[in-house]
Amino acid sequence: MGTIRTSSARLLTAIAGLVLAVPASGQGLAQKGAAPYLPQPAVTAVVRQLPPPPAPGSAAEREDRAAYAAAASGIGSRDWQRARAQRSLNLPAYRQQLSCAFGRQLDAKLTPHLVTLLSRSAQDARRAVNAAKDKFARPRPFTTDGGEACDLMGRPGKPADPDFSYPSGHGTTAALWALVLADVTPARASDLDAFGRDTGNLRVACRVHWPSDIAASRTLAGLLHRQLSASPAYRADLAKARAEAASAPPAFFC
């Protein structure tokens, strides 16, 4: 018994040491104050290319409503809990999941150039999403069809003052980050794409978005990425991020 306890104690000590070795930067991947890459006219042009959401009464809208109703069966499920854990893309847990998809640890201290690339592109995503939401003014599903959502804004009894639904901010940022990090390390493109899709799909499981919101977010991310690829500032940061990624530590605990 004493030997088992001693071995267990040593194991716990070793695990604690590993946890302490993981950098715990207080900065997220979408840092406030980061300068966007794109000028406003480019963002406006991108938003003009985004198709509108399904028209009221259309077959596509009926499919959205049916999917939202079906998602009620997942309340409290594993995907519901996963979606709750992704209510903010700046949470350390989300950063760690993205690091695992990328294969390298993303951290403001360890990989500042990679984090700069993500932070600045996130600002472009934010401006485009906000402009598109204001343009299309599509209500969130729980405000029109009722029911519970995993995000606080959709909880029963809470004052409903959410922003608009189309397109998804989470979905756009995650899809854009997948494309940006694939520019850095093309060999991880498939894993990153799967991660971006999962982030968007969890917003449907969370019941804060219609499925077509998520499809639009992927379209918007692709349009933004095309503009970023032509930006000299983006290309300069990309070169620094590629050099940094080559020697960055592998992602932890994947």
Image: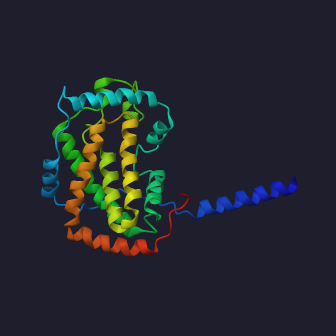
Above-or-below relation of 35 to 167: below
- In this rendered view, identify the residue nearer to me: 116 or 172: 172
Q: Residue at x 31, y 70 (%)?
A: 238
**Residue 32: quadrant of the picture:** bottom left
The spot of residue 239 in percent (x, y) is 31, 74
From the top left corner, tell me how far across and down residue 208 is, in percent: 35, 35
Picture layout, residue 32 above or below residue 247: above
Residue at horizontal 32 percent and vertical 27 percent from the top: 66
Residue 233 visible in image: yes
Residue at left offset 14%, top offset 49%: 49
Q: Horizontal placement of 45 versus 250: left or right?
A: left
Q: Is residue 178 left or right of residue 96?
A: left
Q: Can residue 160 be seen in this view?
A: no
Q: Residue at x 81, y 58 (%)?
A: 6
Residue 102: where, in percent of width, then height? 43, 61
- Residue 58 vs residue 138, the one in the foreground: 58
Q: In this view, does 111 lie to the left or right of 173?
A: right
Query: Residue 237 location, x and y as percent?
Result: 30, 70
In-image side of 54 versus 183 (left or right): left
What's the colour scheme?
A: rainbow
